[in-house]
Image (cartoon, rainbow, N blue to C red):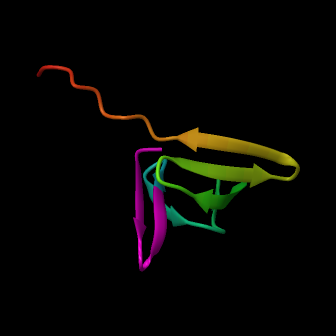
Amino acid sequence: MSGILLGLGGDFAVINGQILTTGQEVCGARIERIEEHQVVLREGDQTWTLTLQAPSNRPD
């Protein structure tokens, strides 16, 4: 996951280069919810949480 956008027009997550919203599927799992720093996916009775990592402050 490379990004999350929360807004009045909907909540979106960028996963594997795709812009997705709640209810859509990615890699066979359905997006249950999109939060400020994480996305919850469900496939059958399994649930996964993808966490957005903070950018590093590495010098160039």
In the rendered image, residue 60 lying in the magenta stretch gets the answer no
Q: Quadrant of the C terminus?
A: top left
Q: Write down the region rendered in magenta.
A: 1-13
The residue that appears at 65% across and 59% down in the rendered structure is: 31
Q: Nearer the viewer, residue 34 or 45?
A: 34
Q: In screen coordinates, is 58 left or right of 17?
A: left
- The x, y position of residue 10, in whole percent, is 47, 75
Q: Farthest residue toward the left?
A: 60
- Please indicate whether residue 40 sits to the left or right of residue 36 in the image: right
Q: Is residue 46 above or below residue 24?
A: above
Q: Which residue is drawn at 70% across and 42% down?
A: 48
Q: Is residue 10 magenta?
A: yes
* Residue found 88% across the figure and 49% down from its top: 45
Foreground residue, 28 or 60? Answer: 60
Which is the main secondary structure of the residues drawn in magenta?
A: strand
How far across and down, in percent of the image, does residue 52 sit?
46, 41
| Rendered location of residue 11, percent (x, y) | 48, 67
- The answer to whether one can see residue 5 in this image is yes
> Hey, which quadrant is residue 53 in on the image?
top left
> Does residue 27 appear anywhere in the picture?
no
Which residue appears at 53% of the width and 56% of the height? 35
